[in-house]
Amino acid sequence: MRAAKAIPVVLLAFVTYIVFSGSTSGYDLVTGLMVSVVVGALFANITVERPSKLLSPKRWYWASRYALRYFIIDETKCHIDVAKRILSPRMPVNPGIVMVPFDAESDYTMTAIANSITNTPGTVVVEVDKKNKVFYVHWIDVASTEPKEAKKGVSETFEYYSKKIFD
């Protein structure tokens, strides 16, 4: 069972290593493999609960779709919005901290939603209340302080995809 948990961690670590090294030379492939095996051995039991979930084509489909949408659409729109605010002489901001409810079953889903919010320009999760299932999010331009409306503006898309992938 430990090997089944380690293999996905090794693969993810290896791909990450190669992408960030920017090289596929023999040295980098061997070094990446060695580092990935160590990472897999150390962290497999911590990071993987059920290895069978990692083999689900449906989850891979939703993860790919989410990655494309997130990096091509959501990130681009938010970068443009923040750039406009910075370059505007009036600097049109209405910052504040809003309560954003979430409905996640797993810690992986909750973490994916929080990371997506934080990595999107203009928003950052400053507190997570797991008991009440609420994120406290600093938002550069608060459109609404009503939790359900804030969720629509901040995290609804992220939650939709994260639940498809992790729950």
Image (tube, rainbow, N blue to C red):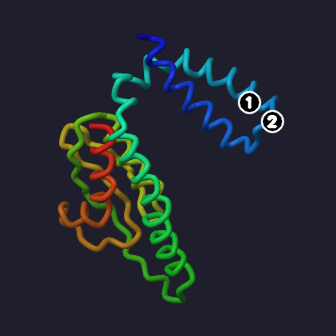
- Position of 3 compared to 159: left or right? right
Taking the view exactly as shown, the residue that stands out farthest to the front is 57
Q: Label 2 belongs to which residue? A: 25
SS type, badge 1: helix
Q: CA distance from mark 2 to mark 1?
A: 6 Å
Q: State which quadrant residue 42 falls in.
A: top right
Residue at (29%, 50%) from the top-left corner?
Answer: 135
Question: Do the CB atoms of the residues marked 2 and 1 lie less than 8 Å apart?
Answer: yes
Quarter of the image with the N terminus is top left
Residue under the point 25% across and 38% down: 130
- Front residue of 148/45: it is 45
For label 2, the SS is loop
Is 54 in front, or is 75?
Answer: 54
- The circle drawn on residue 29 is 1
Q: Is residue 87 above or below residue 152?
A: below
Please identify the quadrant where the C terminus is shown.
Answer: top left
Disc 1 crowd, CA 10 A, few/some/many (<14, 14-19, 20+):
some
| Vertical side of 2 occupied by 149: above or below | below
Q: Position of residue 164 (x, y in %)?
A: 28, 45
Q: What amino acid type is highlighted by mark number 1?
A: Leu
Callout 2 amino acid: Ser
In this rendering, the count of numbered labels is 2
